[in-house]
Image (cartoon, rainbow, N blue to C red):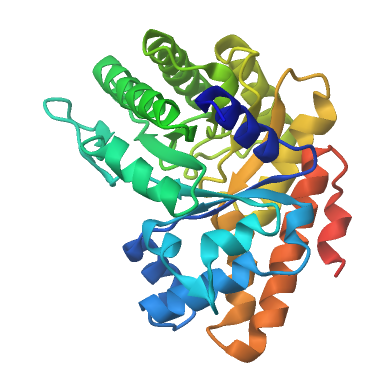
Amino acid sequence: MSITNELQATIEQMVQRGKGILAADESHPTIAKRFAAIDVEATPESRCAYRTLLFTAPGIEDFISAVIEFEETLAQSAGDRALPEVLAQRGIVPGIKVDKGKGPLALSPGDLITYGLDGLAERLAQYKRQGARFAKWREVYSISDCNPTQLGIAANAEMLARYAAVCQEQGVAPIVEPEVLIDGDHSLTRCAEVTEAVQKEIFHALYRHRVVLEHIILKPNMVLPGKDHADRASAEEIAEETLRVLRRTVPTAVPSINFLSGGMNPEESTANLNAMNAGFPQAPWLLSFSYGRALQQPVLQAWQGRAENAAAAQRALLKRARLNGLAQRGEYQSSMESQD
C-alpha cells in the first residue's frame, strides 16, 4: 500500500460520525497526579492495569474510533496481547503522543515551545512497528496582556508543521494540537482573538511544509473565557465564537476537528460539543472530541485502583463515550447525565 493510501485509510477509520478519540497519553508525572487524587501509586503495573481497563471496556468501539497512547503503553500487554493489538482487534486505531514536553521559548518571555523533533522519524518508524498508525503533538499558548507574542505564535506553528510533515513522510497520520490555555482571567473575545491568530499561522506553516490537509486531524481548544474571568459563557456562546474562528482559519480540506477538553469538566465538554453540532449542522468538517480528563475523570472516581471496581469504571467510560457520541451528532440532552 502506498503512503498516500495508508494515510487515507487511517483517516477514514478515525473520522466516523458519532465517534471520537480517547486521549490516554498522560505522561508519568500527569498520571501520577491523577492517581494521587484517588490514593493510588503510579507504577508500571498500575498504569498498565488502568489502561487495560480503558481499552477493554465493553462497547466503547461504538463511540471511540481511536486512542492516543503514551510511549510506555505501546510495549505493555493485557495477557498475551499487546495493548495496541487489543485496540486494533476492536476496530479502534492505536496512536501515539510523540512530543517530549514543553519549556520556555528563548528570548520570548511568557511563551512556551514543545520539544521532540530530534530523531522523530526514527521514533515514528519504531512506533509504527509497535502498531501506532497516527501521532499527536501539542503546542500550548498562554494568554496574558503580552502573550502569546508573534514570535511565540510563529515558532509554535513551525514546530507543528515540521512534525506533521515528518509524520506524513513516515505514513503516520498527524493530529495537530494547538491549545490556547484556559488559565487566566481573559474574556471570551480575547480567547477568540488569540485562537484565530494561532490557527491562521499554523495553516500557513502547514502549507509551506507541504502537509496534505486531507490527511491530518486538528485538535484545537474551544473558544472559552479564562477560568478566572468574572463572566461565564453559555454553551451556545462558546459554540458560536468557536465556529466563527474555525470558519476564518481552517480550510475545508481538513476532514475532522476533534476538540480537546482543556480544563472543562465532563458535562461542560459534552454540552459545548453538542451546541456546535446542534446549532451548526452544516459545518464543513466533522466536529468531534479528543478528550482525556473529560472522559476519564468519572472512570478514575469509580475505579479507585481496585480490581473489583473495574466493571463499574468501564461502565463510567462507556457512558461518557456514548454521551459524547450523541453530542457529536447534536443529539445530547443534559437530562441524559442522570441516566445509567
Q: Position of residue 123 (x, y in %)?
A: 31, 45
Instruction: Give above or below for 165 relative to 79.
Output: above
Residue at x 66% of width, y 24% of height: 255
Instruction: Give above or below for 73 relative to 286.
Output: below
Q: Which residue appears farthest toward the front when viewing the image?
A: 1
Q: Position of residue 243 (x, y in %)?
A: 67, 21
Residue at x 63% of width, y 25% of height: 242
Q: Position of residue 162 (x, y in %)?
A: 33, 24
Residue at x 40% of width, y 14% of height: 201
Quarter of the rendering containing residue 260: top right
Instruction: Give above or below for 98 relative to 11.
Output: below
Q: Report the front residue among 175 and 157.
A: 175
Q: Which residue appears farthest toward the bottom when viewing the image?
A: 308
Looking at the image, residue 34 sits to the left or right of residue 5; the answer is: left
Residue 101 visible: yes
Quarter of the rendering containing residue 31: bottom left
- Tell me the quadrant of the picture where the C terminus can be found: bottom right
Residue 37 visible: no
Q: Report the front residue among 6 and 20.
A: 6
Looking at the image, residue 92 sits to the left or right of residue 333; the answer is: left
Q: Report the front residue among 202 and 275.
A: 202
Quarter of the rendering containing residue 259: top right
Looking at the image, residue 334 sits to the left or right of residue 94; the answer is: right
